[in-house]
Image (cartoon, grey):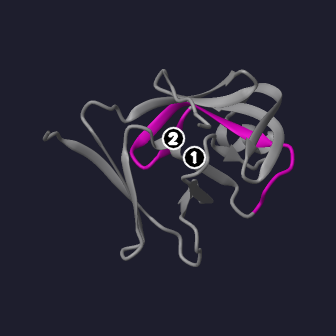
Amino acid sequence: MEYNKDSFEICLAKGYLRPIIELYEIPTLIDTGAVIPVFSFTESDMKDIFNATLIKNDVEITGFGGNDKGSVYSIPDFSIGSITFSPFEVFVPEILRIKYPILLSAPVFYGTVYEFDTQSSLFKVSWGDDYPKNRSFKITKLKGELYPQVNGVLLQISDK
């Protein structure tokens, strides 16, 4: 099926072995194994840099790195290339990780085709006409777990 595509490219940051881009002049890890985006900033930085508001305290996420406790914040407008999220909800851990202050999870790019072109040092993202470039990203808690919700579509994980 043929369809028109919207797309953007962002240069991969030099000197990293992992896929790192710069967003808002901040090193940002694209973690294709992560489910929830993680921002390692203080509460005041979340408010000052991103105009974020606290949604929920005392939440926990589980991943390959173990368990993390923290909070969920809502950023009113967050852009990645030509995609804008309104709102964009993120997990902020109690113990901050400074090496990669922003971690973008795979579900952030739901409905897109994305690739890492290491020969050209580019992160490329494209999507068809049927998927808007203005989106919402929310975090929903079900049965004690956090799940991403993109444009109203709840993305659930199966451990089977």
Quadrant of the image containing the N terminus: top left
- Looking at the image, which residue sits at the far left? 2
**Is 105 part of what is drawn in magenta?**
no
Residue at 60% x, 57% y is 28
Rendering coords of residue 9 (x, y %): 37, 58
Location of residue 150 with respect to 100 vertically, above or below: above
Residue range in magenta is: 77-98
Residue 54 in sight: no
Indicate which disc residue 52 carries: none
Indicate which disc residue 108 carries: 2
Q: Nearer the viewer, residue 7 or 117?
A: 117
**Prevailing SS of the magenta stretch:** strand
Residue at 69% x, 60% y is 100
Rendering coords of residue 102 (x, y %): 65, 52
Is 124 situated left or right of 90 in this image?
A: left
Query: Residues at badges 2 and 1 in contact (C-beta under 8 Å)?
Result: yes
The type of residue carrying mark 1 is Ser
Quadrant of the image containing the C terminus: top right
Indicate which disc residue 105 carries: 1
Is 1 situated left or right of 79 in this image?
A: left
Q: Nearer the viewer, residue 159 or 34?
A: 159
Q: In the structure shown, which secondary structural element does the residue marked by tag 1 occupy? A: strand
Label 1: few (<14), some (14–19) or many (≥20) C-alpha neighbours in 10 Å:
some
Q: In the structure shown, which secondary structural element does the residue marked by tag 2 occupy? A: helix
Location of residue 151 with respect to 93 vertically, above or below: above
Is 2 situated left or right of 44 in this image?
A: left
